[in-house]
Image (cartoon, rainbow, N blue to C red):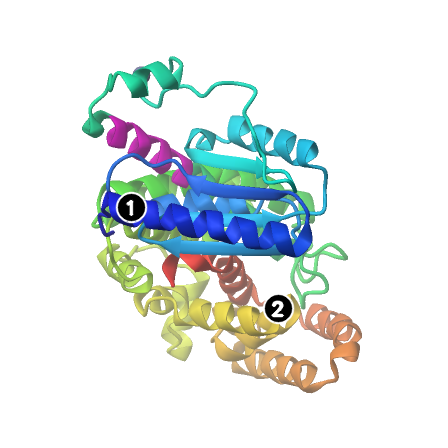
Amino acid sequence: MHPVQLSQLLEAREQRLYRQQELLQKYGKPLISLSMNIPGPVKRSPLIELAFDAVLDRLPPALERIVTRADTGCEAIFCCDRPAEELKRLCQILEEESPVGRLYDLDVITPDGEKLSRAIPRTCLVCGKPAFPCARSRAHSLEELTSAVHGLLTDFAADHLADLAVTALREEVELTPKPGLVDAANNGSHPDMDLPMFYRSAEALRVYFREAVLLGLSSPDCAPTLQQAGLQAEQAMYAATGGVNTHKGAVYGFGLLLCAMGSCLERKDDLFQRAAALAKGCKRSAEVTHGSIVAQKHGAGGARAEAQGGFPSVQYGAQVLAETGDPHVTFLSLLLRCTDTNLLYRGGQEGLDFARSWAQRVLDAAPESRLSLMQEMDQAFIERHLSPGGTADLYAMTLLLDKTRSIWT
Ligand SMILES: [Zn+2]
């Protein structure tokens, strides 16, 4: 987080106008020009980038887009093949609907280079009255302004990351076909579970996900509090599922990852080292779980080792997903790489080997035959009552990491 000088901001503005002109000349179509309205000398931070990325994802498809992340601020120019008035309406909705919309400067520029003005005047960040008189009279100190912005951004981060986490869990269960697991086609090796139950369970965890982010934002060393919150989250999950364990592994893994994300948004740190430190700070529970039984019997580290090692499998999964863009390949690659303790619990070493050889077979197959092979794989798992639940947790965390990738790299 580097403070910038006025001269740098003026230079950045020149650059922006130049790029706008270039795109207007090249396409002769309207532009959306996005910048962040951040008072004070620090214009770029992970918290600011999270809010920036969130609105970037909601802008319409562009003929060409230029995205800049510099110390002078995050900026984007989208050249869109749509009427300027339509783009302006969309931008006003984005500015008004988002809780951090007040921090978005979304200008629409017509093909003639004319800037369409806002219909509704903006309100002050501190007092909520019309912004212009407050700015003109310097009604509020820089400290008041930056504190108001920080409050908006942290609140947004907790809501937004919790939302991405719930979405990741929904996308995980929806991935179809998926061997032995609940998906959109069947309940896999789980007669006691179904798709709506997973949706209810994911939604029940939203409050906990939000709390995990807030805990990380407030302090880097909050493992005991997080652990307490995790226990309550498990109860919320059981209440939503009628006592079925749908997401216990996700409560553990997502809690750590989201808490580490909160911490890294606030202070410069490595996301995975922070997550590992948090995992090491959690007390070992006396509870006998499937994971702990398998750990004793097979010497497999499971979810705990994965977390204490800084989630190497999740990092690997995110790399595969970025390289291939293929959810099924990502899932199978994770299955092949990790030692899934759910598979070990249900099928022993033989079950794990069986699952891995299937994963390898599908990965080696021609891409066009993978989906039908995965349906076969699903049936083979169901017959053996196998379920790679550990892989499913890692895959869901991979999706969460993928959705926020630009922030941590
Ligand atoms: Zn004011």
Q: Is residue 44 above or below residue 26?
A: above
Q: Position of residue 386 (x, y in %)?
A: 63, 69
Cβ of disc 2 within 8 Å of ligand 1?
no
The amino acid on which the numbered mark 2 sits, given as a three-letter code, is Gly
**Cβ–Cβ under 8 Å for marks 1 and 2:** no
Q: Which mark is residue 180?
A: none
Residue in view at x 54 percent, y 69 percent: 322
Range shown magenta: 145-158
Residue hosting label 1:
216
Q: Which mark is residue 325?
A: 2
Residue in view at x 47 percent, y 31 percent: 101
Q: Position of residue 394 (x, y in %)?
A: 49, 64
The amino acid on which the numbered mark 1 sits, given as a three-letter code, is Gly
Query: Residue 310 lies in what quarter of the image?
Result: bottom left
Residue 2 colored magenta? no
Mark nearer the N terminus (1 vs 2): 1
Q: Is residue 350 above or below residue 398?
A: below
Viewer can see residue 285: yes
Q: 355 or 374: which is nearer to us?
A: 374
